[in-house]
């Protein structure tokens, strides 16, 4: 009997033997060697693929993708006295990240390529995105009057 199961946040086909044991019937196809700690490959959105290697420190075994940088033209340096954040061209950095042992990805929102920022869950990001779009719509509606 063939079914699917989720392994390391990836859905892969498995075959269940009459004894009840399951074996993976196929693995993601990649054109680079996978390290032993990453037997099932990367999520489809991971841009790090061939950068994963055996020597990657446990804390750094992350998938990452969808990086987006946005120059903040309305950012006031008076908001922060942190030199890493209060620059002439502050940037907001966003990236989808997932440690290889985590069940789902998170979104990193940081400033100027530093380690200053926050991780938000997918659910939190969806709530924030909806609210941001509502605020944008309200601003456009007010401007149209």
Image (cartoon, helix red, strand yellow):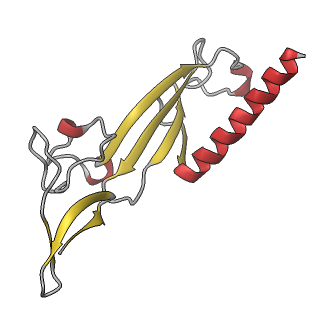
> Camera-side residue: 116 or 23?
23
Considering every residue shown, the one lying at the far front of the view is: 1
Q: Quadrant of the N terminus?
A: bottom left
Question: Can you say whether 142 is above or below 116 in the image?
Answer: above
Q: Where is residue 139 in the image (x, y as percent from the top left)?
A: 80, 24
Question: Can you say whether 18 is above or below 83 in the image?
Answer: below
Q: Quadrant of the C terminus?
A: top right
Q: Residue at x 60, y 11 (%)?
A: 88
Q: Where is residue 120 in the image (x, y as percent from the top left)?
A: 55, 48
Question: Can you say whether 48 is above or below 127 in the image?
Answer: above
Considering every residue shown, the one lying at the far bottom of the view is: 19
Q: Which residue is drawn at 38% across and 58% down?
A: 102
Instruction: Give left or right: position of 68 versus 100.
Output: right
Instruction: Give left or right: position of 128 versus 28.
Output: right
- The total number of labels drawn is 0
Quarter location, residue 117: top right
Instruction: Give left or right: position of 145 versus 64.
Output: right
Q: Which residue is drawn at 49% across and 23% down?
A: 69
Question: Can you say whether 30 is above or below 136 in the image?
Answer: below
Q: Position of residue 4 (x, y in %)?
A: 26, 66
Q: Residue at x 58, y 45 (%)?
A: 125
Considering every residue shown, the one lying at the far right of the view is: 145
Q: Position of residue 99 (x, y in %)?
A: 35, 52
> Camera-side residue: 119 or 77?
119
> Camera-side residue: 107 or 58?
107
């Amino acid at each position: 009997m063939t079914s699917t199961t989720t392994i390391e946040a990836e859905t892969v086909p498995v075959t269940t033997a009459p004894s009840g044991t399951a074996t993976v019937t196929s693995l993601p196809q990649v054109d680079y060697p996978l390290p032993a700690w990453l037997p099932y490959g990367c999520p489809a959105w991971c841009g790090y693929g061939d950068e994963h290697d055996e020597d990657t420190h446990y804390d750094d075994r992350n998938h990452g993708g969808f990086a987006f940088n946005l120059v903040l033209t309305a950012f006031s340096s008076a908001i922060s006295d942190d030199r890493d954040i209060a620059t002439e061209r502050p940037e907001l950095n966003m990236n989808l990240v997932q440690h290889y042992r985590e069940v789902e990805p998170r979104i990193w929102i940081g400033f100027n390529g530093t380690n200053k920022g926050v991780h938000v869950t997918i659910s939190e990001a969806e709530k924030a995105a909806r609210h941001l779009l509502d605020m944008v719509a309200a601003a456009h509606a007010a401007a149209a009057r």
